[in-house]
Each structure stands twice: as structure tokens, then as C-alpha cells.
Image (tube, grey):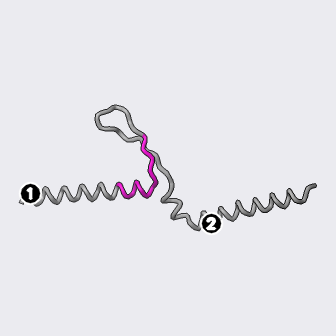
Amino acid sequence: MNFRALGALCCLASLYVGAGVENKKGGATSELDRVICKNLPVSGSHRKQRICRTKLEWDESRKRSRGDAQYEQKLKRKAGD
């Protein structure tokens, strides 16, 4: 048996296992970097468009949309006074 090949295989296996441990340590970062694709309707069309963003980008977009809606509600309340 070729011991050099066996040694190289063991080194590669240890690198692979070590990389898995590092990914678990940085789990919060990798979770936010995960790409999520959604099929969203397009205005003026019956077809949906596939939009892919990271989880962080989807979360920021949702927060921005909610903030805009709350701002519009405040403006309407002030105009009604």
C-alpha cells in the first residue's frame, strides 16, 4: 500500500473536518449570508419574477418597508388633525 497517498488522504480529511468546525463557529455570519430566492409578482404582469438576495438583505428590506409604512401613517394622522 502506498503510505504517501494514505497520508495525503488523512491530511485532506483533517482539513475538511477543521473547515466544518470553523463554519459552525461563524454560524451567525453564514446564516445571514445564505441566499434566499423568492418568486414575487411584477406590477402590470401576470408573471412572477425570481429575486435572490441574502437573508440579511431580505431582513433589511422588510425593516425599511415597515418603516416607510409607519411614516406614511404618521403623515396621514397629522394631515387629519
Quadrant of the image containing the C terminus: bottom left
Mark identifier at residue 22: 2
Under mark 1, the amino acid is: Ala
Identity of the residue furthest to the top in this view:
46
> Which residue is pictured at 78% across the width and 62% down the height?
11
Q: Which one is nearer the viewer's eye here, 81 or 37? A: 37
Direction from residue 66 to residue 38 in the image, left or right: right
Q: Residues within 10 Å of mark 2 (few under 14, many from 20)?
A: few
Q: Quadrant of residue 48?
A: top left
Tell me if residue 37 is in the magenta stretch.
no
Q: Is residue 55 magenta?
A: yes
Residue drawn at x 66%, y 62% as measured from the top left: 19
Under circle 1, the secondary element is: helix
Q: Position of residue 54 (x, y in %)?
A: 46, 54
The boundaries of the magenta stretch are 50-61
Task: Find residue 79 and name its label.
Answer: 1
Marks 1 and 2 in Cβ contact (< 8 Å): no
Query: Mark 2: which amino acid?
Result: Glu
